[in-house]
Image (cartoon, grey):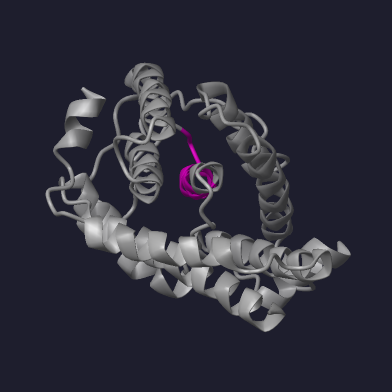
């Protein structure tokens, strides 16, 4: 069962790591809030970074600057495929959906995950956007074989139940640390691989949705960490999630540092 696999997947004690993150979060809470202009500027920067890195991990050739041009000015970049423009535009729309959901306390449901994926593949593969796959898929370069298409609805129902259960635990101040829960949510969605395409981008969006709901900043997995990211996921498929937890926690830590630097300049 899903929850049994999950419970056995992280033998190391990550309490010091999460305590370090929580100390920075507490420091950020004590700082003077950013002005509306500064907050908007930082949000734009993070939206571009999040979109650029998430799509670059999947093979997009748009640079950071080109991603900004597409998102902010709605322009096309000569010599770049239309699908890469759509991926950037769709990811920005998905971020907007994530922010809407993050303003609500309820854990994301299966319907929310399907809606998120629908945005990711909108106008790219409408037939498969927001739809569970109907055939077996294989992950290039991975020894992991995702569950059969027939098993996906059951696995996703278990996954949604786990999100609900751990969300209730989090609200009650027990169970997994919010960063740990978000990282595991990312991993298990990729492990199930419920969609024909867009699993990684959807998983990273969902991870950040859970972080935002819990009051933490987003985790941006950097394109330059792509090899380490895939290696950590592969280790997770073998039952060793420590490397992936560390990667996700480091990403949250970097964003916290960014916010702390911005508030320090504001003081």
Residue 226 position in % (x across, y down) = 40, 67
Left or right? Give the position of 205 relative to 247: right
- Give the number of callouts: 0
Q: Residue furthest front?
A: 30
Q: Predominant secondary structure in magenta?
A: helix
Nearer to us in this view, 88 or 128: 88
**Could you tell me residue 19's position as x and y percent?**
31, 60
| Residue at the image position 48 percent from the left and 59 percent from the top | 219
Residue drawn at (51%, 63%) of the image: 220
**Which region of the structure is painted magenta?**
195-208
Q: Nearer the viewer, residue 181 or 17?
A: 17
- Can you say whether 54 is above or below 225 in the image? above
* Residue 29: % across, % down: 56, 60
Q: In the figure, residue 265 lies in which quadrant?
A: bottom right
Q: Does the magenta portion include 200?
A: yes
The reply to whether the magenta stretch includes residue 127 is: no
Query: What residue is rendered at 47% in x and 71% in y?
Result: 254
Occupied quadrant, residue 69: bottom right
Check the image and report above or below for 257 versus 14.
below
Q: Percent x, y for residue 241?
A: 22, 51
Where is the C terminus found, in terms of image quarters?
bottom right
Q: Nearer the viewer, residue 13 or 188?
A: 13
Asked whether 204 or 35 is in front, the reply is 35
């Amino acid at each position: 069962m899903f929850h049994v696999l999950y419970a056995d997947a992280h033998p190391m004690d990550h309490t010091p790591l999460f305590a370090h993150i929580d100390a920075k979060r507490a420091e950020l809470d004590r700082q003077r809030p950013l002005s509306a202009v500064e907050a908007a500027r930082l949000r734009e920067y993070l939206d571009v970074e999040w979109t650029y890195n998430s799509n670059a991990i999947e093979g997009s050739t748009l640079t950071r600057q080109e991603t900004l041009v597409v998102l902010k000015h709605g322009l096309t970049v000569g010599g770049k495929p239309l699908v890469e423009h759509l991926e950037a535009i769709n990811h920005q729309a998905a971020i907007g959906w994530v922010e809407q959901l993050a303003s609500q306390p309820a854990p994301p449901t299966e319907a929310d995950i399907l809606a998120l994926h629908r945005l990711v593949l909108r106008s790219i593969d409408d037939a498969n956007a927001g739809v569970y796959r109907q055939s077996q898929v294989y992950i290039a370069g991975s020894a992991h074989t995702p569950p059969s298409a027939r098993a996906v609805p059951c696995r996703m129902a278990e996954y949604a139940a786990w999100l609900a259960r751990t969300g209730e635990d989090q609200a009650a101040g027990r169970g997994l640390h919010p960063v740990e829960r978000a990282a595991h949510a990312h991993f298990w969605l990729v492990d199930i691989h419920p969609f024909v395409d867009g699993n990684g981008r959807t998983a990273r969006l969902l991870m950040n949705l859970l972080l935002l709901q819990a009051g933490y900043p987003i985790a941006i997995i950097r394109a330059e960490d792509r090899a380490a990211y895939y290696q950590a996921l592969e280790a997770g498929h073998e039952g060793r999630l420590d490397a992936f937890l560390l990667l996700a926690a480091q990403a949250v830590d970097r964003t916290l540092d960014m916010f702390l630097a911005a508030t320090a300049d504001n003081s």
